[in-house]
Amino acid sequence: MENNTDLPAKEKIIGISGDIDRHIAVVVAGKLAAAAGLDKIAQNRISTAVSELATNIYRYGKRGTIHIRVIEEADKTGIEIIAGDDGPGIEDVGKAMQEGFSTTKSLGIGLPGTRRLMDEFEIETAPGKGTRIVARKWG
Amino acid sequence: MEDERFLSSMSITVASGCLVAHVPSVLQDETIKLLQRDVLDAAHRTGAKGVILDLSGVRILDSFLATGIVNTARMLSAMGAAPVIACIMPEVAASIVYMDINVNGLRFAFDLEEAHQMLATAGAFGEEAKTEDTEEPEEAWIDSKDGADDDVNGDGE
């Protein structure tokens, strides 16, 4: 229906291997969330979640991607973040999601914090299989 | 080295006898460490009794970075310099609360003026900066353990 090529792209994939990539992903997330019409608080929650997820990638998984896209469902719009890495995976997800649990400092608040920042949160991981996290926030 | 200069682009100024550290807008892992080092050094060097961490430029504070700021404030407290975290943007404040970052015992100010007032009331500047027009500023104190109460009563009468 819309063939307006001037429309901003509704999704971006950012490769993550360091702190600078995290920053790029945060900026992209903020722009997409603003373009999707989400309010400032929701925009910040999404950008902060992206920052958490990107940090988890380069700190634990070494290398991965953050895929951010605008999603639409019925009459609502939101943002979906898919964070994937081929790192060592998380051995005990239940534990990683516990408050205050930490293997190397920030994971303890990182994952539970991300879950609270977003409306939906799913995690798939296994030792040696990497980690894939899907999180969504609706406007 | 060049990197370090870029990363530590935080300015620390002295205003009404206390340090004001302007936290840079783009915070990186490394920046937090440098910030911590620079602020603690400056507090130690100047013997400042109060340090304001000005977050007005900060747009994103994830748990790692927030913890870095919070820890810096606690370290200042441990040195005997009263920390006040000031000028947090509303959306950043919201994210901090959603993430459930532990900020117990820390003091927050809406703006730099309020931060200065808090420190003055706490006696962080000794005699000369005591404010007479105290309109219950104590209420603005979100604190439980308060590391800076040693001078509050100063010299009574």
Image (cartoon, coloured by chain):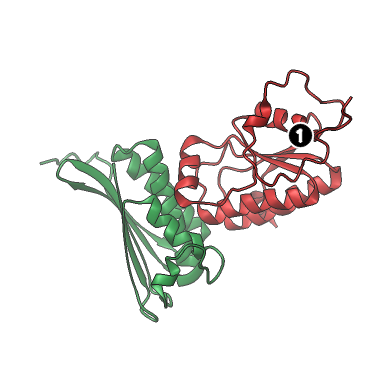
Chain colours: A green, B red
Q: Is residue B65 left or right of residue B128?
A: left
Instruction: Check the image and name the residue furthest to the left.
Output: A1
How many other residues sit within 10 Å of disc 1, few (<14), some (14-19) or many (≥20)? many
Q: Quadrant of the C terminus of chain B?
A: top right
Q: Residue at x 48, y 70 (%)?
A: A60
Q: In this orientation, does residue B71 appear?
A: yes
Q: Quadrant of the N terminus of chain B?
A: bottom right
Instruction: Check the image and name the residue furthest to the bottom.
Output: A128
Residue B113 at what x, y percent from top left?
A: 67, 26
Instruction: Check the image and name the residue furthest to the front.
Output: B157
Residue A20 at what x, y percent from top left?
A: 51, 56
Between B111 and A34, the one nearer to me in the picture: B111
- Write down the residue under mark 1: B122
Instruction: Check the image and name the residue furthest to the top.
Output: B133
Q: Amino acid at mark 1?
A: Ala
Between B11 and A52, the one nearer to me in the picture: A52
Q: Is residue A51 left or right of residue B6?
A: left
Chain letter for mark 1, please: B
Tell me the SS state at disc 1. Answer: loop
Q: Is residue B36 above or below residue B91?
A: below
Q: In this orientation, does residue B35 appear?
A: no
Residue B91 at what x, y percent from top left?
A: 46, 38
Q: Residue at x 67, y 27 (%)?
A: B137
Q: Is residue B129 above or below residue B83?
A: above
Quadrant of the rendered structure where residue A33 is?
A: top left
